[in-house]
Image (cartoon, rainbow, N blue to C red):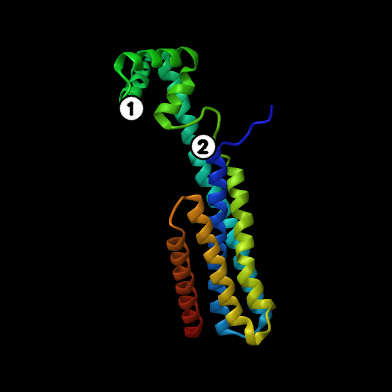
Amino acid sequence: MKKTSSMSERLNTLRAGVLGSNDGILTVVGVLFSVAVATTDQFTIFIAGLSDLLACAFSMAAGEYASVSTQKDAEKAAVAKEKQLLKTDFSSELATVKMFYVERGVSEQTAALIAQDLMAKKPLETVISIKYNLNLGQYMNPWSAALSSLVSASIGGIFPLAAMTLSPVQYQWPLTILAVCVSVALTGYLSAKLGNGMVKTAILRNLIVGIITMIIHYTVGIML
């Protein structure tokens, strides 16, 4: 039977994608602005932007893989710990489950019956869910997060790279700025939707960060 991914895993993969896309946009445009101010050679600008895009994409993927792998290891360690506790201190585990329902307004007598029933049928699954808010056997997939970050960072970085290197020279600056603003606004919108946050605030925040990034790197390029 094919294992289905949990909602938390799917959301984590989407989160990695949104963050990767945003990083791809900002890191690539940073390099493009610094180099394009220092030189007008289009090939040099393109190679610099492409190199940074690849470096950013693989760096984001590696970071996500390491982060999610650590989380997965911690989850597996928690499961192993609870397996041992169920063997050596079952009464304490039972009391924990009972207290969980008592704290949520269930009477002690009813909570005790619920705890006994759950612990008789699915003891490990019950304590893992109650103590760690985890679904037994459903661990985050580091490869999914890494691939999502790799692809999204690459796609995100393509927008400013294409705008700067493929546009007519007289329009490359305004079109690149426009491409960055639209791209970061979109990632702000998606991040707000995924996190149930304030859409306008997220978009505005991303726009401000994007504009500041462009200003800083433009200034750096002038100073070189």
> Amino acid under label 2?
Lys
Count of numbered circles on the image: 2
Which residue position holds label 2?
72
> Amino acid under label 1?
Arg
The first of marks 2 and 1 along the sequence is 2
Residue 216, quarter of picture:
bottom left
Categorize mark 1 by other alpha carbons within 10 Å: few (<14), some (14-19), many (20+): few
Report helix, strand or loop for mark 2. Answer: helix
* Nearer the observer, 117 or 41: 117
Q: Classify residue 208 as left or right of residue 54.
A: left
Which residue position holds label 1?
104
Q: Is residue 192 above or below residue 86?
A: below
Q: Position of residue 92 (x, y in %)?
A: 34, 17
Q: Position of residue 197 (x, y in %)?
A: 44, 53
Q: Quadrant of the N terminus?
A: top right
Categorize mark 2 by other alpha carbons within 10 Å: few (<14), some (14-19), many (20+): some
Q: Position of residue 222 (x, y in %)?
A: 49, 85
Q: Is residue 46 above or below residue 135?
A: below
Report helix, strand or loop for mark 1. Answer: loop
Q: Is residue 39 above or below residue 137?
A: below
The answer for how far apart the CA atoms under marks 2 and 1 are is 29 Å
